Image (cartoon, helix red, strand yellow):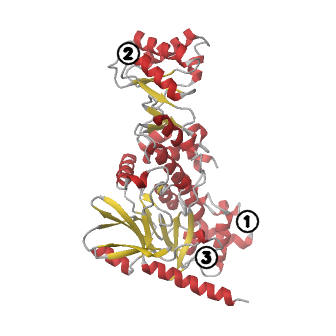
Amino acid sequence: MSINMLNFAYCSDKYQYTMGKSFYDNGMKDKRAIFNFFYRLAPENNNWAVVCGTDEVIEMIQNLGKADPDFFGKFLPGDDYGEFRQYLSTMRFTGNVWAMREGEIAFPNQPVITVEGPMIEAQVLETPLLCIMNHQMAVATKASRVCRATQKPVSEFGSRRAHGPWAATYGAKAAVIAGCANTSNVLTGVNWGCGSTGTMAHSYVTSFGCSVEGEYSAFCTYCKTHMGEPLILLTDTYDTLRCGIKNAIRAFRDCGITNDYKPSFGIRLDSGDLAYLSQRCREALDAAGLENCKIFATNGLDEYLITDLERQGAKIDSYGVGDAIATSKAAPCFGGVYKLVQIDDMPVLKRSEDKIKLINPGFQITYRIRQNGKNEADVTCLRGDSMELKLQKKAAFTIRDEYDRDKSKTFSAGSYEAVPLQEKVIEDGRDVHERRSLAQKKQYFNETLMSFDASERRLINPHYYKVDISDNLYNTKMQILNRLNSEIADFE
């Protein structure tokens, strides 16, 4: 089977299927299960994360049951698995899925995706769903941080450092949704209609001969063969100030590139002291009457370096960022989890030895409370509980901090809008999700981001937005915990 023909519904762990065999043999496969995908901590002390990957999860779920028994025989061999293999080869997902839309801003412990369905069908989705969501949310969240470091455009240039072609293509998509102006990845540009962009490599310059005159020839040839397109010349192959910028100005002049050239033209700096070099290059370009010539900077950039360049007064018009975004380099493992929260009508939870791993039980939904166009708080309810009924009626309600019940905030009747963050995307196994373009997802993220206070958007020590759970959810959680603790204390 070639890589192009792989069905990513089966990019899974074997234990999903060995557990499934137990469910199948013991009459549990059709118990109604509810799983939540959520995360516990945002990376790099961020306040929140950017949702991305739900479209690919929907596609993955639709591909379940499209493998023949022989495929399953390669990892579930033997006669004991024969009947189970036959069942798996036709097992399609028949349940329901709710998900936050791509470009949404999600906070810890909120259900980004909720899967409701027969136990075995919902269980085997865990690994491929986590694989997709943890990758794209890591990249999207990092891209949002990098782009928030500047008001200038940021391009995603990380395909060569991504963890494989799938990661490069879908990671670039995530980066564009979360703020990047564009990407260099051709597949992303074609698949999502966002186009792709790029400049030139050092090998292009040296291919004209390792000399100052060869650099000039490379620049002239590039301008002539791409006339009418954006023209960005790479000036640091030999020496940025002593020959690179001079040859760029000379090539622009000799090729008839004036200050009014459309669509755009510029130079790229890829090494050295970017703040100093950009300032000197800006002076040289302005002196040559090329005030509209843009300066593009690359070279291992991230949000911290970009912030520092801005602080130093760098004359940079746009940035290209590679591995910091493509691999979410500072926090490459996002850490989302997929946990069972209800079986049939019984809420369940994982207690664990670590307090942070305690989860919220039951069938949940999250509402975002908005006033005067601004996001004021999020509250996660049990579906149909008293809090949700109040929110739907715009009645007065009070939220309380889960860990300090004395902290509370009251919203008066009619003073707010309560927006549910999860929407149904699969119903009885059918894909019913609303199709949105990459541009629509990007616009939604930008609008959502700006609906939060500036203090909640900052990179360092962000102000923490109010994120709470309903009293019903809190009480359900504590009842289960208290019962468990009592049983454990009495257990011999």
In what element is the residue under mark 1? loop
Circle nearer the viewer, 1 or 3: 3
Q: Tag 2's secondary structure?
A: loop
Does 238 sit left or right of 417 as displayed? right
Graded by Cα atoms within 10 Å as few (under 14), some (14 to 19) or many (20 or more), the crowding at tag 3 reads some
Is tag 2's residue or tag 3's residue first in the polypeptide sequence?
2
User: Which quadrant does the C terminus fall into?
Assistant: bottom right
Q: Amino acid at mark 3?
A: Arg
Residue 322 visible in image: yes
Q: Around disc 2, counting alpha carbons within 10 Å, would you say few (fewer than 14), some (14 to 19), or many (20 or more)? A: many
Residue 167 percent across, percent down from the top left? 57, 46
Q: Which residue has dot 3 on it?
A: 351
Name the residue: 43% across, 22% down: 282
CA neighbours of label 1 inside 10 A, class few (<14), some (14 to 19), many (20+): few
**Residue appearing at x 52%, y 80% in the figure:** 477
Q: Secondary structure at mark 3?
A: loop
Instruction: Please tell me which residue lies in front, 271 or 435.
Output: 271
Q: Nearer the viewer, residue 433 or 185?
A: 185
Q: CA distance from mark 2 to mark 3?
A: 67 Å
Residue on which the image places disc 1: 77
Q: On the image, numbered disc 2 is attached to which residue?
A: 257
The type of residue carrying mark 1 is Pro
Q: Earlier in the sequence, mark 1 or mark 3?
A: 1
Image coordinates of residue 94 in percent, x first then y, are 48, 70
Question: In front: mark 2 or mark 1?
Answer: 2
447 is higher (above) or lower (below) than 89:
above
Placement of 219 over or under 59, stated as above or below: above
Depth check: give the residue in front, 29 or 107.
Answer: 107
Query: How far across and down, in percent of the image, does residue 186 sit?
Result: 49, 36
Measured as percent of width and height from the top left, residue 144 is found at 46, 48
